[in-house]
Amino acid sequence: MPRQVAGKVVRSDFETSGKKPGILGMVFSTRMLVAFVMGYASGLPLLLTLSVLQAWMKDEGVDLAVIGMMALVGLPYTLKFVWAPFMDRFTLFRMGRRRGWLLILQICLMGAIVFLGFSDPAGCPWGIAVAAFAVTFFSASQDIVIDAYRREDLSDAELGLGASFYINGYRIGMLLASGGGLIMADHIGFRAVYLIMAACLLPAVLTTLMAKEPGVPEGTPKTLKEAVIEPLTEYFRRKEALWILAFILLYKIGDTMASAMTTPFYLDIGFTKTQIGAVVKLFGFWATVFGSLLGGLVMLRLGIVRSLWVFGIFQALSTAGFAVLARIGNSVAALSGVIAFENLSSGMGTAAYAAFMASITNKKFTATQYALLSSLMGVPRVLASAPTGFLAKHMGWVHFFIACTLIAIPGMLLLLKSASWSAGRQEVQSA
């Protein structure tokens, strides 16, 4: 039975095949393994041009102003929708539209990381800027194709679980690059670290070679003009188009604003850096991983739309938990409880958020439409986070976190227009 999400009728792969695998069959399927490895490949390069590169430049005595300006090399992650249409329009090699692009981009990404490793931060800052920009460009381009592949490879019923596997792979890739990279740098130097990180992408290349090319019954764009214009016109022909864009902007805005100031908050109420590292970073990391996986499993039962409602409420309540912690003060037990609930709910909410964006893309233009939506998703992270220090300073911690909780309400209300509870009922019935 077809389902309708955001005004768009979608048929799952199971409807055409007549087969519906069980939950264990989905969890342990090859498709989920591919989603996990591709998430790992997306997450690994990210911090190689941020925290790891900053540490290397600091060690080499590079001026702080130059280190700060290096943040600009991350622009490709924000602007990736500009060249996404090329990846919808053209097919490289006989491997297929998605796997052909993935193979060439992953090889180029490995080469760019090696190039960055052989750069000289102190002697040639411009050279390292070019190398870092090459890493972010090929990494952002890889993200475009991976997002499109995941949407086209997974059935509609599997999108939520696939998003959770992808996100967990992404976080493990980031942890390997940042935590592992910085620890190794103390023993073998940064150049060797970058060479090792380039080699760590080999599992992704092997996965690309062995994975199957997803079929696209909707066809592919025949011209570059069609690849650029049609994704926009097809999307904005939907009556809920503007409501969905507003929802994407606002759904996680309260959570994002609160997260931007948590480290100063922990220090301000008396937690030590060791306590923050142990509870917030290590314990919190695994809580987020578990939350993402749990969110994927819950979505198999509730569907994507209903999960957005439930997880959105959890996110708002977890933000309010910081206000409670501000009242309690320095308590490791209270901090652990707040972090467990916040990271668990954030992991679930992020998985549903990513699955929803994938579900509303047209498979003919997956790369372009998902790149546009995911770029839009990053806007609040920059703009909404900017005034948080001013707000916290003048409102105090308790009132600041209460305000972040209330700011989440408009995003929840937009679900009435973009993904109503009744649409979620139809989704569950047709799954």
Image (cartoon, helix red, strand yellow):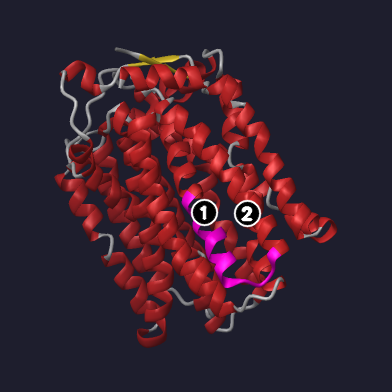
Q: Look at the image and say whether residue 332 sits in the magenta stretch.
A: yes
The residue identified by callout 1 is: 341
Q: Is residue 118 among the parts visible in the rendering? A: no
Q: Residue furthest right?
A: 394
Real-space Cα separation, disc 2 to disc 1, in angstroms: 8 Å
* Residue located 59% across and 78% down the image: 273
Helix, strand or loop at disc 2? helix
**Residue 237: which disc?**
none
Q: Amino acid at mark 1?
A: Phe
Image quadrant where one finds the N terminus: top left
* Residue located 58% across and 84% down the image: 61
**Vertical order, 115 against 19 (above or below):** below
Image-quadrant location for residue 261: bottom right
What is the x, y in percent for residue 88? 36, 30
Image quadrant where one finds the C terminus: top left
Mark 2 and mark 1 residues within 8 Å of each other at the beta carbon: yes
Q: Foreground: 284 or 104?
A: 284
Q: Is residue 313 left or right of residue 300?
A: right
Q: Is residue 205 left or right of residue 71?
A: left
Q: Is residue 76 left or right of residue 363?
A: right
Q: Which residues are magenta?
A: 328-344
The residue identified by callout 2 is: 321
What is the x, y in percent for residue 310? 50, 35
